Image: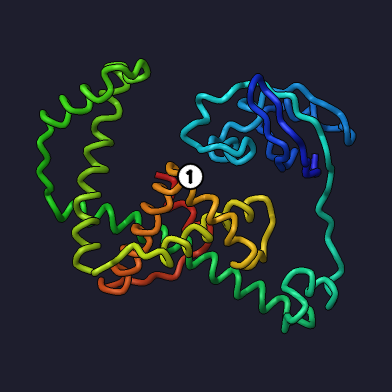
């Protein structure tokens, strides 16, 4: 159950030559049991939609866009090509070189603990900024009463989706309020982007694409990858039109949030990790 599996996937006309997933990340107990005890060369017929309930994780395993997960097959032939496990290494200079590169300044266990603290600060600062972005959207939406032509928008969306069988009246009624909120926020954030003079340069786009790619690898414990290593994968991300749109939106949102962070009055609070986590529960 602690193993990482490298495997190929086959389902109807779908083929993925190589993917990577952790057995312990499989949500369904029956599917997980299918993979415990496998050997290299074994083929398992498994329902991967049951295995990975989180759409983002399933999209990563299948190597497709998250938006296309619903259209994907349920069952796959999973042929195991590699099995590996994480083991705790000795905290010595050899290990630190493997982690941080041959030229690392981390030489001792004390250096390593200092480095860990530095990395935790960066991670927690990122989470704090994310919470700030949520609060920012909430406060600015309250402060700016954006008027939208709701009747027109309702007719327009119904017209655009007239051939979409998935857009039932019930789905439409559930999604329409969210669409209005997103459009209001887009109007507000676009105004901030113009005021801040934020430009979507190729450098800004590449930087954010690398950030997205790094997060995908770190989800599976593959940390410490340099920008140079990630750059080709980031470029592939940008070649896919749908992925590119997400990267564009994310890059602009991040730049806008950074501008707001530097230009509003902040009330800073020290808080425990546990209490901070509870702020996200609602």
Query: Which coloring applies here?
Result: rainbow
Identify the element where label 1 is drawn: loop
Could you tell whether 243 is left or right of 81 in the image? left
Which percent across, then down, holds residue 266? 30, 72
Which percent across, then down, holds residue 277? 49, 54
Residue at 52% in and 60% down: 211
Q: Which quadrant holds residue 194?
A: bottom left
Q: Is residue 262 above or below residue 5?
A: below
Residue at 88% in and 32% down: 41
Residue at 64% in and 38% down: 61
Disc tally is: 1
Q: In the image as oriented, which residue stretches furthest toward the front?
A: 239
Residue at 70% in and 40% down: 19
Q: Which quadrant holds residue 59?
A: top right
Residue under pointer 1: 240
Nearer to the camera, 62 or 124: 62
Nearer to the camera, 141 or 49: 49
Could you tell whether 274 is left or right of 83 in the image? left
Nearer to the camera, 202 or 256: 202
Neighbour tally class for label 1: few under 14, some 14-19, many 20 plus, Cα within 10 Å? few
Q: Which quadrant holds residue 73?
A: top right
Which percent across, then down, holds residue 264? 25, 71
Nearer to the camera, 273 or 105: 105
Figure quadrant of the N terminus: top right
Figure quadrant of the C terminus: top left
Which percent across, then down, holds residue 88? 83, 60
């Amino acid at each position: 159950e602690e193993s990482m599996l490298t495997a190929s996937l086959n389902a109807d006309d779908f083929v993925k030559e190589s993917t990577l997933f952790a057995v312990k990340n499989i949500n369904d107990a029956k599917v997980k049991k299918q993979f415990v005890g496998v050997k290299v060369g074994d083929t398992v017929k498994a329902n991967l939609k049951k295995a990975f309930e989180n759409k983002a994780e399933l999209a990563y395993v299948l190597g497709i866009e998250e938006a296309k997960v619903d259209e994907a097959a349920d069952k796959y032939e999973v042929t195991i090509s590699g099995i590996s496990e994480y083991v705790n290494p000795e905290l010595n200079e050899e290990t630190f070189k493997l982690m941080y590169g041959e030229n690392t300044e981390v030489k001792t266990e004390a250096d390593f603990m200092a480095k860990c603290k530095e990395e935790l600060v960066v991670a927690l600062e990122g989470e704090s900024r994310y919470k700030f972005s949520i609060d920012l959207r909430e406060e600015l939406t309250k402060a700016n009463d954006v008027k939208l032509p709701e009747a027109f928008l309702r007719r327009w969306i119904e017209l655009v989706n007239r051939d979409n069988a998935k857009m039932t009246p019930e789905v439409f009624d559930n999604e329409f309020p969210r669409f209005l909120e997103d459009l209001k926020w887009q109007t507000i954030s676009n105004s901030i982007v113009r005021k801040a003079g934020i430009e979507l340069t190729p450098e800004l786009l590449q930087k954010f694409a690398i950030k997205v790619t790094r997060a995908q690898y770190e989800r599976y414990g593959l940390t410490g990858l340099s920008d140079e290593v990630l750059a080709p994968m980031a470029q592939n991300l940008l070649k896919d039109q749908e992925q590119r749109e997400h990267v564009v939106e994310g890059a602009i949102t991040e730049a806008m949030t950074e501008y707001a962070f530097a230009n509003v009055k902040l009330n800073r609070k020290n808080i425990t990790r546990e209490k901070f986590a509870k702020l996200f529960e609602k």
